[in-house]
Each structure stands twice: as structure tokens, then as C-alpha cells.
């Protein structure tokens, strides 16, 4: 795993005196040091400069980057891992390639030399890379089809291209402007995260998953080379057939992702996904597998006892870090923002960082269970969407609208035990009045899109889901609502929130995370399953559960799913509230963004909810307060202009 950086300068700019300033590249590399503390490198190519920081995983001694072809025509900087490369390597050798290392980096370089962009669909793994052709003066950027690895870029008005694995490193280039993208801010306030390709910085984009960008003398083209598909024609006649194939591809995926020249462990939460990955991994490690988990003081967030039970059952060497007394610190928030590059409302970034630091003390690579919810049906959003559709089919629209209005007046005054039911009923009726794509966005909204006009001080930029969704929404209309919801999550929430959180927080600790459930073979198997094999009796991930059942204790399957997060109100202290107030003082950078009274209302509501733990509004109230602090602190930390 690495951090890659670089830029390319068009001929006209070079004729006017622009050159590859290697001191800029060195600053970008230094800002990426945590992504690759083992070694670094940089090369100047005349029209471009490429650099990287390397976390050495395979062929440690010989696979340094940037890696060049013998004639120095092609130069590669690469972040990621390719799996099952032996077949591709044998094919290249049969065509005359001769290898000097055992690294996947050299396989990628020689595949590109042989086939150019046509090699991309054959690459199995996670990656974000840049490759330059000195003879043609061309630079390509490419990213894996799921979006596991990051790759940001900015294109200047004169055709200058700057790219990096992280936003903070990208901003080390003085040409990249630091201006707020107001349309993306709206998306962030609604969705809690930003879907690719958007970022909070005007003009800075993330390359979409499965896409390749071609730059030549300032002219840029982007095309898709591989798509994250939707449901495929059904291929399984029975549960037994689907379970057998899934076990086979899970075993192959995990086995291929255990390959490394350094120690490999697993994140183990005790849930279905991470436990299944750990169970298959334990079958293929000659020494006891090392596992890592994080525990919390509040029982409703804590699954550490279950993780310990799974670890004991599998015979892993288990280590646990607890955050019993974790308290907010401004320094921690600053480091969090530096690594994330932009605000993310998901507070589970904090425990992800904490457990990554623990794992990095013992291994260089871990496997995680991310991806199971999106492809096997583990989120409550799907069940919500299905219930909403039933409501819409049974009750007239006028009656639903009236019921929503009544509940809006009742819920705030209802006793605590009824307030949650009233809120959920109102939410369901409101959702039933929306189209399917709008329902998806509203189910998770932090601020409903309809309320943004009363939140933001300036006129709305008008970003809607159709603009931010990477694909054609019409292709979802023919799917069952649960499958359409899973597809939306896989194309937006997974690469926009889950995977960035895991990548940035693990790399902050110089730890590589691999995701076997996002192997293309596992995804393909999941997409060929009928919905009934994923959701059975109102419970998701049916076939995934059965695939791992013989290997795991029964308690894994009787345990109710818990989200991996941190109880924010337990973390908020006087230092947090003092910062929250100061960030929105009259002369603060963020204050002009919001209408008068909005920030105070959010903070007052959050503090009131904090004083009454367990109330319905706790989660949303805390997350809103957390989001406003992150946005304001990020604006100051990155010196972003409004």
C-alpha cells in the first residue's frame, strides 16, 4: 500500500517557463508519509513528475517505485494490491515479458507495456495508479472498479493536471485552489458523505471507480473500463448450490488476499461479515491468526465479548483496545481531518483509527469484512424501503400526507416510549410520498433536502441525487426495491463513506486493509443470487450466514446486528462544546454559511439530548453537532475560502 502523487504540465505552459518543480512533489510525498513510511521515490519526466511513498508488502527489497520499463519509456506509481496474478504473469511471460521481481507492481507495469488500457479489465484487486508514457507525453490515472483505493485529481484552466491519493497531499501543490464547492456542501449535509466524484473543494474530483483518465498535453478524456454490475440472471437452483459456490469463492478470495511477505491479521468485530472472513482466513494460516477488535463502555455499542468468543473458537491470537474513557481532543479532530481530507459524518472513523493503531503494532496487513452489507443485504434501509413501498400501495396519497401532518404535531409531545414509534411512522409516511431515488436519500438524510433552504445562508446550488449518483438511475427501476437500495448503497455509500473511512484511518496508522468480500468473484456470486437467498424471514445475509455457519460459534448468528460506531455523546466534553462555540463566533470562517440561529439551535438541541441519554433524538442531534464542527474546523484547517 502506498501514497502516490504527481502532476503533468502541458507544452504551452512549459514554453512559458513552467517546469516540474520537484520541491513541490517532495512536499506532496512528505504529506503522504504515513501511507508509506518504508521508502519513497520521485522521478522527473520533462512533461510530468511522479512520486510515491511505499508501505512494503511484497518483494520488499526489489519492488521500489517509481518503477520504470528498461527503456524508461513507461513509469508507474501504484497504490494497492493485485491478487491471483500468476495467470496474468504466465500469459505475459509467454508473450516475451521477463520479470526481475515477484511483485504485483511489475506485473502491472508489464501488463500495461503489453496491452495499454486493454489490460485494465483483467486486473483483480484494489488500486489507484498513474502511469506515464515519456515518448507520447501521455499520463493515465486508473482506479479499481469498486472504489477501494482513492485517487483525487484537479485540472487547471491551462491543462495542468495534479493528482494524489489524499486531498491533503493534493493541496500541497500551490496551483490547486482552496475554494468551497457549495453544491457538494449541500450533498454532505444531506447524505453525511460525498459520493464520487465530488469533493468539498471546487474543481477537485475523485476518479470514479472503474474509470481511467487519459491526459495528453492538457487534453483530458475519462472512460469507464469496468462496471460494478447490478443483479445478474439467476444462476442458482437452490440454497445448497448457492452456499457451495459462495464458500468456494470466499475461500479463494481470502486465500489470495493472505499473500504477503509481512504478517497478516484480521479485524474482528464479532459480526457476521468480519467473523466469516476470519473463519476462512484461519484455515489458511500456518501460525495462529492475529485478530483485533475495539470495545466500548456503553453496552449498546459494544460487541467485544462476541469478538472474543469468535477468536477463542477460531484459535486466533486476539488483542482488544477499549475506549472506555475516550474524550474529545481538538488535536485528535485535527489529525482526523488531515487524514480524511474532508468532513465525514460517520463517527466510526474514530474507533477505526484506534483499532488500526493497535493492529499496526503487530502486523502490516489486515483483512476486514467490509462489503457484506451492500451485496448480501445487511442494512435496515432495504427493509425500510420495502415497507414504505407497501404503505404507498395500500393507502391513498392524500391520506398518507394527512397522517404525516398529524404525527408531526404529536411526536414532539409524546411520552418517550411512544415518541420513537411516532417518529418512525411519520418518517415512513413522508418517504412514501417520494420517488424511489428520493426515498433512498431521505432514509439516511442528516438534514432533509427540503430543509436546506432554511439552513444555508446563500441561495441553494441545487445538487440533486441524479447529479451525484454515478450511473443511470433508470436502470434501477426494474429491480425489487431491496435490490435497488443495495445497488445505490454499493455505488454511493460504500465508495463514498465506508471505504474512504477504512482506507484513510488504516493508512493513518501505516496499515494496509484488504477486503475479501469485495473480490470480484464474491460480488459476481452475490449478484447472481435471487433476493430470497439474501433476505429470508426479514433477516439479511441469509446465504452468507450459511456459508460460514460450520466454522463459527452459534452465538454469532443469534446476536442482533449492531452498527460499528462510537457513542458521540459519551465523547463530547467541555473542550468539544467550547470549540463548537468558537468555530461559529461572529468572525469565524464558517459563520456566513448558515442562517442566523441555525447553529445555535443545533448545538442547543444536542446539549439537551446529551443531558437526557437514551432519547430518540440522540443520534441525529449528536451527528448534526459533530458535522457542523467538522465542517467549520476543516475550513479553518485547510484555509478554504467560501
Image (tube, rainbow, N blue to C red):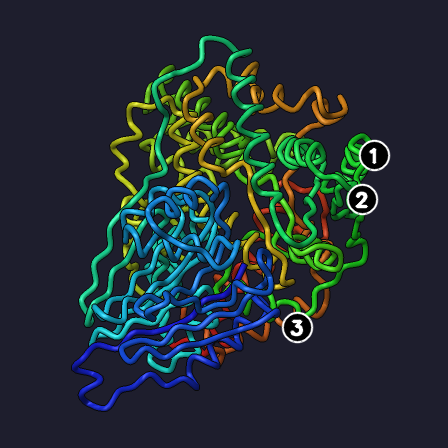
Q: Where residue 585 appears, x then y in whole percent?
A: 53, 76
**Which residue is found at the position 46% from the left and 25% from the top?**
525
Q: Is residue 388 left or right of residue 74?
A: right
Q: Where residue 594 appears, x then y in whole percent?
A: 42, 65
Of the pair 42 and 555, the residue shown nearer to us:
42
Q: Is residue 77 visible?
A: yes
**Which residue is found at the position 60% from the left and 55% from the top?**
512
Which residue in the protein does label 3 denote? 331
**Element at label 1:** helix
Between marks 2 and 3, how big is the CA–CA gap? 30 Å
**Element at label 2:** strand
Of the pair 111 and 301, the residue shown nearer to us:
111
468 w.r.t. 553: above or below: below
On-image quarter of the C terminus = bottom left
Asked whether the beta carbons under mark 2 and mark 1 sit within 8 Å of each other, the answer is: yes
Neighbor class of circle 1 (other Cα within 10 Å; few <14, some 14-19, many 20+) is few
Which residue in the protein does label 1 denote? 312
Q: Where residue 202 appears, x then y in whole percent?
A: 32, 68
Asked whether the beta carbons under mark 3 and mark 1 sit within 8 Å of each other, the answer is: no
**Element at label 3:** helix
Lower sequence index among marks 2 and 3: 2
Of the pair 624 and 40, the residue shown nearer to us:
40
Q: How many labels does the image show?
A: 3
Between marks 2 and 1, how big is the CA–CA gap? 8 Å
Q: Where residue 284 appears, x then y in whole percent?
A: 68, 35
Which residue in the protein does label 2 denote? 318
Lower sequence index among marks 3 and 1: 1
Amino acid at each position: 500500500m502506498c501514497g502516490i502523487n504527481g502532476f503533468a504540465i502541458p507544452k504551452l505552459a512549459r514554453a512559458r517557463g513552467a517546469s516540474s518543480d520537484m520541491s513541490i512533489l517532495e512536499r506532496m510525498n512528505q504529506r503522504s508519509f504515513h501511507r508509506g513510511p518504508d521508502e519513497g521515490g520521485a522521478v522527473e519526466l520533462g512533461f510530468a513528475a511522479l512520486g510515491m511513498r511505499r508501505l512494503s508488502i511484497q518483494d520488499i527489497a526489489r519492488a521500489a517505485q517509481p518503477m520504470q520499463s528498461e527503456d524508461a519509456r513507461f513509469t508507474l506509481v501504484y497504490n494497492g494490491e493485485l491478487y491471483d496474478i500468476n495467470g496474468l504473469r504466465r500469459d505475459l511471460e509467454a508473450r516475451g515479458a521477463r520479470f526481475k521481481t515477484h511483485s504485483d507492481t511489475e506485473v502491472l507495469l508489464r501488463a500495461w507495456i503489453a496491452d495499454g488500457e486493454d489490460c485494465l479489465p483483467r486486473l483483480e484487486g484494489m488500486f489507484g495508479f498513474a502511469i506515464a508514457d515519456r515518448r507520447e507525453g501521455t499520463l493515465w490515472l486508473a482506479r479499481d472498479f469498486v472504489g477501494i483505493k482513492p485517487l483525487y485529481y484537479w485540472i487547471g484552466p491551462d491543462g495542468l493536471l495534479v493528482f494524489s491519493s489524499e486531498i491533503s497531499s493534493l493541496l500541497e501543490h500551490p496551483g490547486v485552489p482552496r475554494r468551497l464547492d457549495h453544491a457538494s456542501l449541500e450533498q454532505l449535509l444531506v447524505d453525511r458523505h460525498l459520493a464520487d466524484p465530488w469533493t468539498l473543494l471546487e474543481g477537485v474530483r475523485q476518479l470514479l471507480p472503474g474509470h481511467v483518465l487519459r491526459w495528453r498535453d492538457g487534453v483530458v478524456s475519462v472512460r469507464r473500463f469496468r462496471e460494478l454490475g447490478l443483479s445478474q440472471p439467476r444462476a442458482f437452483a437452490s440454497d445448497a448450490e448457492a452456499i457451495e459456490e459462495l464458500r468456494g469463492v470466499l475461500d479463494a478470495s481470502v486465500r489470495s488476499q493472505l499473500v504477503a511477505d509481512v504478517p497478516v491479521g484480521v479485524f474482528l468485530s464479532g459480526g457476521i461479515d468480519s467473523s466469516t472472513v476470519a473463519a476462512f482466513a484461519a484455515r489458511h494460516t500456518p501460525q495462529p491468526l492475529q485478530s483485533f477488535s475495539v470495545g466500548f463502555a456503553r453496552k449498546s455499542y459494544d460487541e467485544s465479548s462476541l469478538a472474543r468468543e469468535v477468536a477463542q473458537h477460531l484459535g486466533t491470537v486476539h488483542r482488544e483496545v477499549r475506549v472506555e474513557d475516550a474524550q474529545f481532543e481538538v488535536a485528535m479532530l485535527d489529525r482526523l481531518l488531515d487524514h480524511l481530507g474532508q468532513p465525514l459524518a460517520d463517527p466510526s472513523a474514530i474507533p477505526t483509527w484506534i483499532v488500526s493503531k493497535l493492529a499496526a503494532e503487530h502486523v502490516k496487513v489486515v483483512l476486514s469484512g467490509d462489503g457484506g452489507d451492500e451485496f448480501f443485504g445487511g442494512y435496515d434501509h432495504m427493509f425500510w424501503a420495502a415497507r414504505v413501498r407497501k404503505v404507498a400501495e395500500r393507502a391513498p396519497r392524500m391520506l398518507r400526507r394527512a397522517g404525516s401532518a398529524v404525527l408531526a404535531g404529536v411526536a414532539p409531545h409524546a411520552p418517550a416510549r411512544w415518541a420513537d414509534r411516532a417518529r418512525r411512522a411519520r418518517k415512513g409516511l413522508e418517504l412514501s410520498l417520494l420517488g424511489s431515488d428520493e426515498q433512498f436519500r431521505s432514509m439516511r438524510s442528516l438534514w432533509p433536502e427540503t430543509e436546506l433552504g432554511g439552513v444555508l445562508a446563500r441561495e441553494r446550488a441545487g445538487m440533486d441525487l441524479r447529479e451525484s449518483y454515478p450511473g443511470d438511475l433508470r436502470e434501477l427501476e426494474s429491480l425489487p426495491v431491496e435490490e435497488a437500495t443495495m445497488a445505490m448503497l454499493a455505488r454511493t455509500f460504500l465508495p463514498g463513506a465506508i471505504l474512504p473511512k477504512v482506507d484513510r484511518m488504516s493508512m493513518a496508522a501505516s496499515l494496509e486493509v484488504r477486503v475479501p468480500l469485495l473480490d470480484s468473484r464474491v460480488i459476481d456470486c452475490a449478484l447472481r443470487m435471487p433476493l430470497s437467498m439474501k433476505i429470508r424471514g426479514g433477516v439479511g445475509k441469509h446465504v452468507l450466514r450459511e456459508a460460514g455457519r460450520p466454522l463459527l460459534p452459534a452465538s454469532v448468528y443469534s446476536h442482533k446486528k449492531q452498527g460499528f460506531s462510537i457513542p458521540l455523546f459519551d465523547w463530547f466534553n467541555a473542550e468539544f462544546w467550547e470549540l463548537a462555540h468558537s468555530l461559529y463566533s461572529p468572525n469565524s470562517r464558517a459563520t456566513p454559511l448558515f442562517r442566523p440561529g441555525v447553529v445555535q439551535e443545533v448545538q442547543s438541541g444536542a446539549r439537551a439530548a446529551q443531558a437526557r441519554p437514551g432519547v430518540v433524538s440522540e443520534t441525529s442531534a449528536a451527528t448534526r453537532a459533530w458535522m457542523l464542527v467538522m465542517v467549520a474546523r476543516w475550513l479553518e484547517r485547510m484555509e478554504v475560502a467560501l
